[in-house]
Image: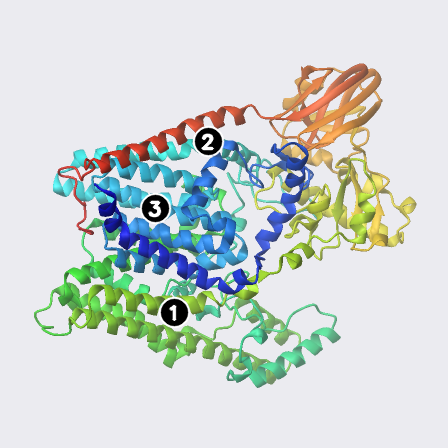
Amino acid sequence: MNFSNIMKKAAPDLVAVLIFLAISIAYFFTPMSEGLVLGGHDSVAAEGLKQEQVQYKQHHGGEVSRWSNAIFSGMPTYQTAPSYSATDTLNKVGYTFGLGTIYWFPAISFLFVYLLGFYILLRAFNFKPYLAALGAILWAFSSYFLIIIAAGHLWKVMTLAFIPPTIGGLVLCYRGKYLWGGAVTALFTALQVVSNHIQMSYYFIFVMAFMAVAYLVDAIVRRKMGSWLKATGVLIVAGLLGVAANLPNLYHTYQYAQESMRGKAELTAQPAKGQTAQKATSGLDRDYITMWSYGIDETLTLLIPDYKGGGSSSILDRENVEDLPGYDDFYQCAGQTQQVFQQSGLQATPPGLNLYWGEQPFTVGPVYVGALVCFLFVLGLFYVKGPVKWALLAATVLSLLFAWGKYVGITDFFIDHLPMYAKFRTVSSALVIAEFTMPLLAILCLYEISKRKELFQLTNWKQAPMVKKVGLPVATVLTLGFCLLVWLAPGVVGDCISQSDATTFDYMRQAGFPADLVGRYMAAITSMHHAILSADALRSAFIIVLGILVIWAYAANKLQGWLMCLLLGIICLTDMWQIDKRYLNNDSFTEESVMEENFTKSPADARVLQDTTYYRVVNLGTGGSPFNETSNATSYYHHSIGGYHAAKLHRYQDLIDRQLNNELQQFVNAVNNAQGDMSQVKGDSISPVLNMLNTKYFMFGKQADQVVLNPYANGNGWFVSNINFVKNADAEMAGLTGLDTKHKAVADEKFRAVLDGSPLDSGSVQVTAHDLDCLKYTISSPKGGVVVFSEIYYPGWTATIDGKPAELGRVNYVLRALKVPAGKHQVVMTFHPASITATNSVAYAALAVIIALFAFALWRQSKGKERTSNGAEECSKLAK
């Protein structure tokens, strides 16, 4: 095949790629041209943690540390800044897939790879380029995908972008293109896994399993089991190659998961008064897993984006809010209510200020797949033939069941019996499955219409096939009909008052607010919400009508196929563009200098940083809990005992719930009562756990005089005179309460062999060098004994005494301890897990095989040898 023929064949695909690039640039043109950067809260949090690692690399010739001291008193970087040489190579491949736009303007790259990934999937189905390009637009502009860009959930973004081409590899394999299918599956499995959002990959395992079963059913019917088995074997090997290419990250993530909040809880005893606790499960707490459950009726945001009001923002910020019916009454009632609340000393917020009235605690925005997509999806359930349709329907239903969480009883079954399900939170994000299956089935439906135009013609209705007689009216009534109903009579969906607002109104009645005020207030909110809902329902109806007219014109031979796709693309892109701009717009970006203001060094920071010794701080001036500091701004400069991460060490979370929260409250009260005179604060008795973490500074604000030195901090290490060995975690936590941590320790019985049998003595412990993954001490004592270090215990840390290996133990639930003999000794602790080198070697080997597969596939294609094998045609006749 000569070069001109190759270019001629590739020209439509190249045009599609250029269109995707142009669309991506157009969406982000303003922030790009003004040199702005994405300002999502997760981006800020990541920046806070990144600084420590950046400094480490600068001072260590580009080497990477596997440990962080910046957050939660110390934790591995496996989930905060994963970096391995093999996976760094894979990341560069991913950047190439995005045409390097990530180096230019990252947001453009995210949208572009969304588009290109789904396009590859549809081309794997052998769809014509213009139909595949339309499908890519339907998928990529689903609102949630843009919302997570705005929020800075960039690992999730990249994982989702690489999932469609992974499934494209599956389709190729079941079409008999084993070599290309295997190569594509292996590469994009590797790329989605390296993007490091296991939850998204986990959800789409179900999609792939359903599709494999669908092809199995087709193979059984067609008596082609040999082809199915061969394709499945290729996919398994390809998937294993993709996984192996990520072995360093996967292995250490798995290892860390056992120790993190995603692992099994060790505490079973009920918390004491003033303590909190998580329920013991093999994973996250049930309430934590299902906190963000999508309301059952809230699922209609797939069709009408503002079905629950949109995102959690102030209704007063809505454009032209004063034109909404009921606004004047609302404004007056809200003002009166706020005045009464303030006079009564209540911190409550007047009802109705939150624009969102759904069931989630809060949300950035709804999951909207497009009104026309919903219509075509329902129509596709009737028009599309073959078992793949049922696979997509099953996956959609599973997606809804996952997302509904606490609102459906089957969630308990999922948590208890479905492998790994309990490791993930925010179940509403499972709707990403529906955001994949619905546009895919919608495009399959358009493909069927392109083959059988009579399915959408309005003539010869009596002779029409049953699927047309039933499908077209059902799809029209369920989507267009419902939108028109909500437009004309929004009251059919209820009063549109959120549960939290309803609770506040109940309180107002009990508190003696005038019944007329409460009634008028509720009526005003309902009127406003109904107007918002009605307007969006009319908008969705209009989009569906436009789409139906274009498809009808094509079926009536008034439009060619490419023109139909172009017009539908314009309609759907305009529709979804407008919705997406509500949540990812120019305001989502900020100047880099403003972004840096999140980490401007305050006078309080400067004062603390004058101390160049090794210690930790707690920041109580963030306006919330120091253990949920979403900006991680404290970690930018300091070794913090707090911070923000969704998968902190489980034992540390236990420590927060059972000890630290209570001690912090007592300490703050004591400091306030003593008016800052620390000599009047009984620090050893009220904050022993804070002291054992070497919490030397308490920051109550950003000013220098708002920093309090804690003279009771235990220091970097100390000898203890007594160790109480107990039988389990419950006893260890109980023994820690009120413990004199400067002189005594409590340890699990399993560490008796490591720590027992040594004379318990006093002595000196001095840090001579401290780095993220290496600590050096000079320790002296007349008789020797057990030294407790203010460092978090984690498997992988090793110790030597005068160069000879020594075994670390764990005491006080989270700290390291070491038995040190009499005399003066040099103790070194390091964190350089040998598993990193071993897993990197495997990853490089797998990557080499993947590259070889692609090279071989290209060679065979150049020789004209890569063809669909006999008897292994498309199993469902979906794409010829």
Question: Residue 533's quadrant in the figure?
Answer: bottom left
Q: Which residue shows up at 19% across the image and 43% down it?
A: 217
Q: Secondary structure at mark 1?
A: helix
Marks 1 and 2, how far apart in space? Answer: 42 Å
Which residue occupies the foreground of this view, 801 or 265? 801
Question: Residue 37's quadrant in the figure?
Answer: bottom right
Amino acid type at image mark 2 = Leu
Where's residue 802, x and y in %? 74, 15
Left or right: residue 844 compared with residue 631: left
Q: Which residue shows up at 27% across the image and 42% down it?
A: 212
Residue hosting label 1: 575
Which label sits on residue 75? none
- Rate crowding at label 3 as few (under 14), some (14 to 19) or many (20 or more) other CA atoms within 10 Å: many
Residue hosting label 3: 165
Which residue occupies the foreground of this view, 218 or 69? 69
Q: From the image, state whether disc 2 or disc 3 is nearer to you.
A: 3
Q: Which residue shows up at 40% across the image and 61% down it?
A: 23
Residue hosting label 2: 247
Where's residue 9, x and y in %? 23, 49
Q: Secondary structure at mark 2?
A: helix
Q: Is residue 802 above or below residue 253?
A: above
